[in-house]
Image (spheres, coloured by chain):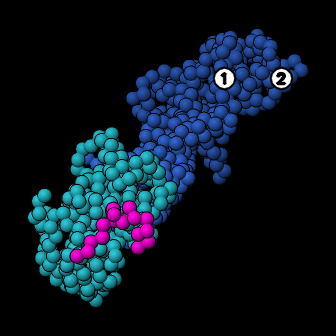
Chain colours: A blue, B cyan
Amino acid sequence: MRIAPTFNVAYRALRRNKMRSVLTALGIIIGVGAVIAMVGIGNGAKAQVEAQIASLGENVILIFSGSTTSSGIRTGWGGAGTLKIEDAEAIRREVPGVIAVSEEVVSTTQVAAGNQNWFTRIYGESADYFDIREWPLADGAPFTAQDVRSANKVCVIGRTTATQIYGNENPIGQILRIKNVPFTILGVLTPKGLSPQGVDQDDIVIMPYTSAMKRVIGGTMLRNINVQIGDARQVEAAQQQIISLLRQRHNIRPGRDDDFTVRTQQEIADAATSTSRVMTVLLGAIAGVSLLVGGIGIMNIMLVSVTERTREIGVRMAVGAHGNDILTQFLIEAVTLSSVGGVIGIICGIATSRILSIYANWPTLISVSSIAIAFLFSAAVGVFFGFYPARKAAALDPIEALRYE
Amino acid sequence: MNNGSLVRLVDVHKVYRTGEMEVSAVRGVSLEIKRGEFVALMGASGSGKSTLMNILGCLDRPTSGEYFLDHADVSGLNRDQLADIRNRKIGFVFQNFNLLPRTSARENAELPLIYSAQHLSHAQVRERADHVLASVGLAGREDHHPSQLSGGQQQRVAIARALINEPELLLADEPTGNLDSRTSIEIMAIFQQLNEHGITIIMVTHEQDIAAYAQRNVMMRDGLLLQDHLVSQRTNAAIQLQQPSASTL
C-alpha cells in the first residue's frame, strides 16, 4: 500500500545527497567489480586448462615407464625404461576396449636443414598417435603403420619447427637432418598452442617410434604408452586390466610397488583443474573482502544518515508514519545503494576482464551464474548492512526525535 | 456546527521513569475541549504543558487516566494505531517548523498523504498540496525549498502540511516562538481564520499576548490545571493587520 511512495521518499533522500550516495555505492562497485573480474580470470584459467587437457584426446590412458630402483638409486617416472615394446603389443592384444595404442619415446636434439638449425623435441610414436590426440595435419600426410614397421626415415613437424627452419617455404617433401640422419618431411601438424605447463606443443618433430629408437635416440625401452579406449565406461576397467597385465609381465610380486604409472586423462584433468579451482576461490575470496568493506561503508553512511535525519524521522512519525514505513524507507535506501552499485560493478567487472583478456592476453570467462550471484550478493549486502541502521531509525521515539538537535 | 466534545481527558497522569527516579509530569488532569474551540495552553517550563501536549497529540500515552478523542478512547492504542490517529485526525505545527530540508514546499505539504490510507493519484496529491498551500497564502511558492522561504512562510508551509489531511484538531507548539511580532500576527490571523471555519485548535504558548488570540486559556502549573477561563478581550489578528500602527505588539 505504501511501498510506492516509500520508494519515492528513499530515492529523493539519495538524490539529496548525491556525492555521498555515489561514494557509498563506489565501495560496492569496486567490491562487485573485483569479484566479477577475479572469478572471471579464475574461471578463464580453469576453462583453458580443461580445454588443453581435453586436447590430450578422449578416453585416453597414459602409462608411464616407472621408477626402478637400481643399486639404491630411484630413477623417477619416465626416467628408467621399464616399458617394453612387447608390453604395448600385449595391451593392444589383451585389454578389451582398446582401439588405439601409441608407443612413445621422447628426446630433444638439434635438427637442421640447409643453413638453418633448431633445437626441438623429437617424439617417436605409432601411426595411431594422431588419432589418439585428435591432432590432424594442416598439410601433407601422416606416416603410416608400414613406416613404423620398417622404421622409415620420415617425420611430420609442428608449426613452430616449420617456421623456424623453413620460414615461409613449404617444408613438405624437404629433408630434415636429425643427428645427421636425413628424414623426409611428410606433413605439418595443425597448431595446438601452449600446453597446461606452458610448453609450446607446436615445437616438435614426430616420427615412427621405431625410427626414433633405431636412428635418433637409441635404446629399446619406451618412455610411455598412450592407450585409447573406445567407450568412456570401459576406461576404469581397462586401467585396472593394464595394471594387472603389466605387473604380471614385469614379474612384480604382490605387495611390491608398480614399476610404471597408469593415469587416465580424467585424473590428469582433475589434478590440473583443482589448482585453478583453488585459484578461483582464493581470488574470489579476496575480492569478496572488498565487497564486505563496501557493505560496512553502507552501514556507516546509513548510521550517519539516521542520526542526521532524526528530526525528519520524528516529523514523519508525527504525521502518521509507522515504524515499518521508516524501516522500509531506510532499507530501500541501503538496498538501492548496494544493488545500483552491484549493477555498475558487474559492468565494470566485465569491462575489466575484457580489458585483461585483450591487453594482457589472460583468458577470462564470465558466467551468467557468477553475474546473478554477484548481483544477489550485493543486494543482500544492502539488506544485511542496512537493517541495523533502519531498525534503529524505526525504533526512535517520535517525541525525542522531534526534539533532537 | 457540532458542539460536542472533541477532546476529553479524564484524570490523566504521566509518570516518567529515569532509573530509580520517578517524575510525575502530569498529575491528574481532566479537561474537555469542544469542537470548534481555540484553546491556548499556558504555563512555565516544567509545568507539564509539553507532556500534556504530547498526550493530546497522540505522540505519548498517559500512564493512567483516559483520553477520548472524537469519543474514541485512544489511551490504550499501540504505536501504529496512534500513528494512524495522528495521520487522520491531528495536524501538528511546531515552533521550529520541522520542515524537511532541501525539499520543496509542495513535497513538505504532501508528507502526511504518503502515510495516509487513502489511495490518491499523484495528480490528486499534487492538487491537494497546491490547494492547501494557496489557502495559507503560498500560491506560486510551491517549488521553493525551506531555505528560500522566510520564517513566516516556512511556518505557513508547516500549517499547510498540518491541514492537508483535513484534521479535526490542530496542535500548535509555540507556533510563533521563532517569529517576529508582525509575522506572529499573520500566523495568528491564519489560525483565527481556520478556527472560524470550524477547526479545533490547541496552542501551547507562554506569551500572554499570543494567548489572547485564543477563545479560552488553560493554565498549568506543576502538572495540574491551575486556571481555565474564557478570554474576555480577544485580540483579532485580521483587524490588527489592517492597522499599520499596531504592527509592533
Give the residue drawn at x 54%, y 39%. Answer: A347
Residue B144, given in percent of the width and then of the height, sits at: 47, 51
Residue A348, given in percent of the width and then of the height, sits at: 56, 41
Front-most of residues A404 and A84? A404
Q: Does residue B136 show up? A: yes
User: Do the residues under discs 2 and 1 have CB atoms within 8 angstroms?
Assistant: no
Front-most of residues A261 and B207? B207
Residue linked to disc 2:
A112
Residue B246, magenta (yes or no)? yes
Name the residue type under label 1. Pro
Q: Does residue B96 show up? A: no
Q: Nearer the viewer, mark 2 or mark 1?
A: 1
Tell me where the magenta segment starts and ends, as one range.
Answer: B232-249
The tag earlier along the polypeptide, 2 or 1, is 2
Q: Specify few, some or many for label 2: CA neighbours under 10 Å numbering under 14, 14-19, or 20 or more.
A: some
Chain ID of residue with mark 1: A
Give the residue drawn at x 87%, y 18%. Answer: A114
* Quarter the C terminus of chain A occupies: bottom left
Q: Quadrant location of residue B21?
A: bottom left
Which label was assigned to residue A206? none
Residue linked to disc 1:
A191
**Which type of secondary structure does the marked residue at label 2 adopt?**
strand
Name the residue type under label 2. Ala
A405 over A167 or under it: above or below: below
B190 over A130 or under it: above or below: below
B87 over A36 or under it: above or below: below
